[in-house]
Amino acid sequence: MKPAALITFLMMGASSLVPAQPPGGDPAWANDYDKQRASVYAAREADWRIGSVVYQVIVDRFAPPENREAKRDLYPPPKKLREWDETPKQGTYLDDAKVWSHEIDFWGGDLQSLRTRLPYIHDLGVDVLYLNPIQLAYTNHKYDSQDYFAVSPEYGTREDVKALAQALHAQGMKLVLDGVFNHMGRTSPMFQEALKDEKSPLRAWYYIGPQYKLGYRAWVDIDNLPEVNLESDVVQKRLFRDKDSVVQGYLRDGVDGWRLDVAFDIGFDVLHALTESAHAAKPGSLVVGEIWNYPEEWSPSVDAVMNFHARQIILDVVNGQMSGVHAGRLLDQMIADAGIEPIMRSWIVLDNHDTRRLATELPDQRRRHMAQVIQFTIPGSPNLYYGTELGMTGGGDPEMRAPMRWDLANDANSEYAWTRSLLRIRADNRALRVGDFRLLPSERLLAYMRRTDKVAETIIVLANPTDTEAGDIIGTRDSKLMNYGKLMDQVSGAEVEVSSGLMHVTMPAHTIYVLKPRIMEAGREYTPYKRVQ
C-alpha cells in the first residue's frame, strides 16, 4: 500500500474494514449463497406483513374518553358504565338478555380516545395496531355483531375508522380489524327477522329449524351467537365477494387487514375465497386466522395464523414441562411443515383477550422474560396484548380484559423498560425480522440461529430453561463465524467464544442469551471479518 493510501486507510478508521468493497460490481465480499439469498431477504423486508410487531387493543378498555359522562346514554340498563379504575369481575347470567352481566359492563373507550394514544403505541416500536371487534353489537366484546357494516356508536363511526387508519399510516403503522363472520348476535335485527318470518330472504343467512334445540344453530351452543351460513352465495357476496362487502369495504376505507375470529370453524374453502377477495380489494393486505391447531396447510387459505402452537411450546419449555432440545425440534418441525414465510406472517401470541395475562400465567419473572425473548426472536410477528408491556395482571375471563393501567406507563416500571428493550433489540436486528431459522445441535439447551446474507446480522439464541446450571457444546452451523470470534449477548453483555465452529457454553438456570457477532474488537484495527459479507 502506498503511503498516501495507508494514511487515508488509517484515517477512515476500523469501520471501513467491514464490509470492504471488492473489485467489480458484486456486493461487498458476498459468496454465492449470499448473492442467491439477498433478494429473498429484501422481498421479506418489503412485505409489511412479515416480522411486524402487532399491538392488540380492546377499544372500550384502552384509553378513557375525554368526557365519559356525555356518553352515558349509549349504555342503557342493564348495561353499566364502570369507572376506569374498576376491575372486571365475573357476573351473573341474565336470562332475558341471554348474556352474562360482565359482558355488558363498559369502560367507555372509543376510537377518538384511542387516536390520542397513538404516540405511545408508535414510540413502543409497533408496526401494526389490531383492534378487537368494533362492529355494532350488544356486548362489550362485540363478538355478537348486529350489523357488520356499522361501527358501534360507543366507539364511533366508519369515518372514525378512516381517520384512525390515516393517522396510523402517517406514522408508518398499519390497521387490522377483527372479523367475526362465523356467527352474529341474537339481537341482530337481521337474525330476529329471519327467526320470526319463515319467508324472509334473510333465512339464507342462518341455520334455522326444529332440528336445533334452540331453534337455530349457535356457536358452541351459546344462545347469543347464532351461526352464519357461510356456504350461502348471498352471504358470501355481502361478507367478502362484493366490492362494497364488509371485508372489501373496510379495506377500501383504509384498513390494511383482517384477523378472522374462530377461523378454524370457517374451513379452508371459505377462508381461501375470503382471502382472495381481500387481496383483490387491497393487494398486500393481511388475512390472519385465529387457528389454535397445528399451523401446517392453512396457507394459502389465509396469509397467516395466530400461532398458538408456538405459544404452547414456549410456555411448556419455560415451565420445565419439556426440554429445550425438544422445544427446538418442535419449532424447527413447525417451520419446515408450514413454511417459513407463512410462519413469519403469523402472530406469536403469549397472551390475549382469551387467555390469562402473561404476568399471571408466568409470575416468575425469569420464566416470563425467557418466554418473551423467545417470542421476539423466533420467526413470526410478536403480538403484544395491551398492558402486557406494563406487567398488567389478570386471570380468566373477564379479568384479563381490564382497562389499561396508564399509571404504570413510566420509566420507574421495570417491566415497561424490559419490554421496550426487547422491542429495540428486534428493531435493531434485521435477522430477527426477516432472517431464516436454523436449529443448532445441542444436548441440553434450546439453541437456534436467525441469519441473513450478512454475517454481522447473525443472531444466535441459547436458552437454559432448567432449574440448574447447564453446560453444552453447540455447533454454530455458520461458515462465516470466525474462529476465536466473540458473540455478545444483546441483553446482558455476556460473551461466548467460537472455537472451530463450536461454542462451549455454561449457562445459569433460567437464562437466555441473544448473541450477535462482535465484528470489531475494542481498540483493535484488525478484524478477521474484513473480507466476508
Image (cartoon, grey):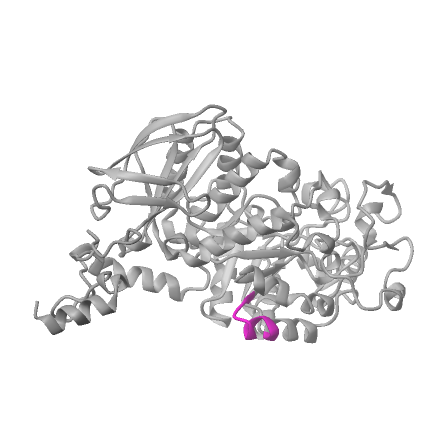
Q: Which of 374 and 348 is in front in this view?
A: 374
- Quadrant of the rendered image containing residue 151: bottom right
Q: Check residue 200 for magenta coloring.
A: no
Q: Check residue 171 for magenta coloring.
A: yes
Q: Which of 386 and 457 is in front in this view?
A: 457
* Residue sitting at x 27%, y 56%: 454
Q: Is residue 521 shown left or right of residue 301?
A: left
Q: How many labels does the image show?
A: 0
Q: Looking at the image, can residue 293 be seen?
A: no
* Residue sitting at x 35%, y 53%: 435
Q: Looking at the image, can residue 512 be seen?
A: yes
* Residue sitting at x 50%, y 37%: 314
In the rendered image, residue 152, in percent from the top left (x then y), is placed at 75, 65
- Quadrant of the rendered image containing residue 147: bottom right
Q: Which of 113 and 78 is in front in this view?
A: 113
Most extreme residue toward the left is 2
Q: Which of 321 and 146 is in front in this view?
A: 321
Magenta stretch: give its range: 166-174
In the rendered image, residue 307, in percent from the top left (x then y), is placed at 50, 45
